[in-house]
Image: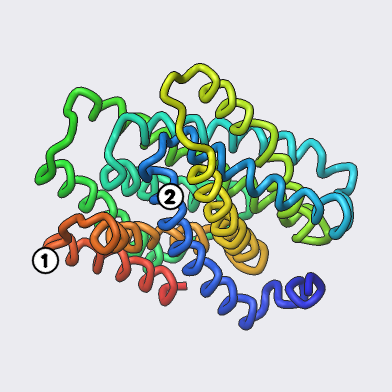
Amino acid sequence: MSQWLIGLEGTEAGHRLALALALLAALLHAIFGALQKGRHDPWFSRGAIDFSYGVMAAPFALFVVPWPEPHMWPIFAGAFVIHASYKLAQAFAYSKGAYTVVYPVVRGTGPLFAVIGAYLIFGEVFTLAQWAGVGVLLAGIFGLAAYNLIHWEFDRDTLKPALALALLTGGFVALYTTYDAYGIRATANPFTFLAWFFFIDGLFFMPPLMLLRWMRMEGRPAAGPLMARGALGAVIAFFSFGAVMMATRLDKVGEAAVLRETSTVFAALIGWVLLGEKVGPRRLALMALIAAGAVIVEIGG
């Protein structure tokens, strides 16, 4: 399968597949974010998810895919540091602010920086039409966050740090998107990068933090439901992260990063359908802006 995928790089079929993978990643990432922000402490949710996908990835990394080439180990070390920083920023942001405010700000900041990073690292150039699409998409995303801020009741004392952390998290989103795109292109077999990334990233950072936090708590959460959520989140993470990373190998990094941010639309729909949050005509219009921006980016290329 890896040879088939590699053969699609730079082709029209590869472009279409990358588009589908980026949109799939958008849907799954919104579900992943809702799982982390759900009824469990965000630190526990993320720790359970990471532990689950680290355990699941271990046999594939060790016994199925080819082992990484020597030059890949420093790349994995860099990815570990970047993703650890991203997770810390995200967990603090979710601890301080509401999901429906934090998530759009994170996802709105990421694509702008990712497009710039794709230009600097990979030499990708957006057309004027594509930049217009990015502007439309960002207007919808930040408009959605602003609408939530104005019309919904939140703990105003933690609002400013939550927004600052959301912006920081968005910066890390852009950083890991471009860095991981570099990493998955640096190895002969893309599945080697994915398997070893999940193995290293999953077991050696958040689970130890989660265990320390759990041991210090008095009212500890039940392990069963938490790990069930972790296993579900792990499966979603495999397909979400794997899809967008494969899209960045098959086609342009910047386009994949922008299209993935339609996850904000899916997040709003999840909030409406599953969390009982009201949508209303204004939010629907803003969601339409996000979708329109993504379409313009695709057509403008």
x and y, in percent, of residue 199 in the image: 73, 45
Q: Disc 2 to disc 1, how far (Cα)?
A: 26 Å
Query: Which residue is located at x 36 percent, y 42 percent?
Result: 39
Residue bearing mark 1: 281
Query: Which residue is located at x 53 percent, y 50 percent?
Result: 228
Q: Quick one: label 2, few (<14), some, or many (20+) residues within 10 Å?
A: many
Q: Quadrant of residue 167?
A: top left
Query: Which residue is located at x 18 percent, y 47 percent?
Result: 148
The secondary element bearing badge 2 is classed as: helix
Query: Which residue is located at x 59 percent, y 38 percent?
Result: 83
User: With 296 as the anchor, is 7 left or right in this view?
Assistant: right
* Number of numbered discs visible in the structure rendering: 2
- Relative vertical location of residue 145 with respect to residue 47 in this rendering, above or below: below
The dot on residue 82 is none
- Relative vertical location of residue 116 with respect to residue 98 in this rendering, above or below: below
Kind of residue at badge 1: Pro
